[in-house]
Amino acid sequence: MKCRNCGETLSLVVCDLVSAPMSNAYLSGIELDEPEIYYPLCVYVCNQCWLMQIEDYEKANEIFGEDYRYYSSYSSLWLRHAEDYVKKIVPRLGLNPASKVMEIASNDGYLLQYFKTLGIPCFGVDPAKGPARKANTMGIETIVAFFDADFADELVHTKGLQDLIIGNNVLAHVPDINNFVVGLAKILSPHGTLTMEFPHLLELIRDTQFDTIYHEHYFYLSLKTVESIFKKHGLRIYNVEQLFTHGGSLRIYACHTEDSLHPTETSVNLIINEERSAGLFESQTYLAFQGKADKIRSRFLQFLIEQRTAGKRIVGYGAAAKGNTLLNYCGIKGTGLIEYVADASPFKQGFYLPGSRIPIVEPQRIFLDKPDFVIIFPWNIKNEIMKQLEDIQEWGGKFIIPVPELEVIDA
Ligand SMILES: [Zn+2]
């Protein structure tokens, strides 16, 4: 297998999670009678360009197609994050009703709606038909397509060059990262800015976030690696911010390399230096990862078995990809240890988690059943979830956070 950025042969395995079904392949009741397809799930890092990556076992259009069950607007935290971003970026770049804004992976219009309110022309591109349909119904133009260099040519023709291009949590999900970045450079106006958010590899390594590894997530990105890929295609990162979303993300600001309106700020080198000190450009760091992941798995399983043996009831919250990776790596099947997973999204309720086949129910069930423990799978938004479920304290219920270290928290 070759590095999908530089073509070097990949030999350094960071974490071998053996195999798992696609993490968003939720099963309907009828599908429980069918076999499931498991794909190998193994992450490598390239020791030339330090791009951490998995092999793509399924075509991207199968992953993010019609069946894609993630609707951004069902997370109130994510909506607030989007609104704050728009409030900040509009004055910063001096955007107005004559500006052009495009978002890639715009989902159901969760973010673009705030530009629309301000009267700033905008449109989105997203391959998932369901969320795109919802955005279009709300009056937010959304083109159902995968963004790449060829499609960028087409868009330049029909939509013109863009003053702001936004791409949140998309850079890690594109199979051909070079082709994607070429497309960005093509459609960015001469003094335009593009901002992208992605989970920071530094946090993944530091906190052993092995449960953020799944098939849909091709790349695990450091600022240094992204900077060098952008540079290759005539783009320069001029600023970067650290965010708390998804367990620690970066928001990068980039422009055309020669754009003198946007001098490079000190933040860029600061974070690259931090990555270097954390060992992100040394093999040793990656070789230590698997052992740490295995320890988290043992501790989590040990806890579940102990509590079940003592007759305690355990349920989960958040039918997210993270939980699926963790459950599959732990080899958990059925409802023996975890009775069900509650999720606020009506698009997931009534289905079953891929692999573990644990049923997904509506959150209200927790208050009827009064379980002893609620495992929070999307630990990146644990504070929001614990607040929503704080009433479990009425019967002495406790929260469990499995990663990076097993934590039992009183409600
Ligand atoms: Zn490489």
Image: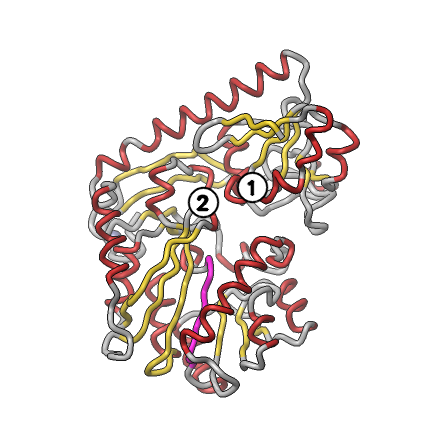
Q: Are marks 2 and 1 in contact (CB under 8 Å)?
A: no
Q: Front-most of 213 and 3?
A: 213
Identify the residue shown where x is 52% and y is 21%.
301
- Compared with residue 246, is residue 72 higher up or lower down, i.e. above or below? below
Magenta residues? 162-169
Q: Mark 1 highlights which residue?
A: 383
Q: Front-most of 366 and 354?
A: 366
Left or right: 352, with 156 as reference point: right
SS for tag 2? helix
Q: CA distance from mark 2 to mark 1?
A: 12 Å
Say whether residue 362 is magenta: no
Circle 2: residue type: Gly
Q: How is the image coloured?
A: secondary structure
Majority secondary structure of magenta residues = strand
Q: Position of residue 293 (x, y in %)?
A: 40, 30
- Compared with residue 104, is residue 305 higher up or lower down, i.e. above or below? above
Q: Front-most of 26 and 246?
A: 246
Residue 247, label in figure? 2
Which quadrant of the figure contains the C terminus?
A: top right
Circle 1: residue type: Asn
Q: Earlier in the sequence, mark 2 or mark 1?
A: 2
10 Å neighbourhood of mark 2: few (<14), some, or many (≥20)? some
Q: Position of residue 308 (x, y in %)?
A: 63, 16
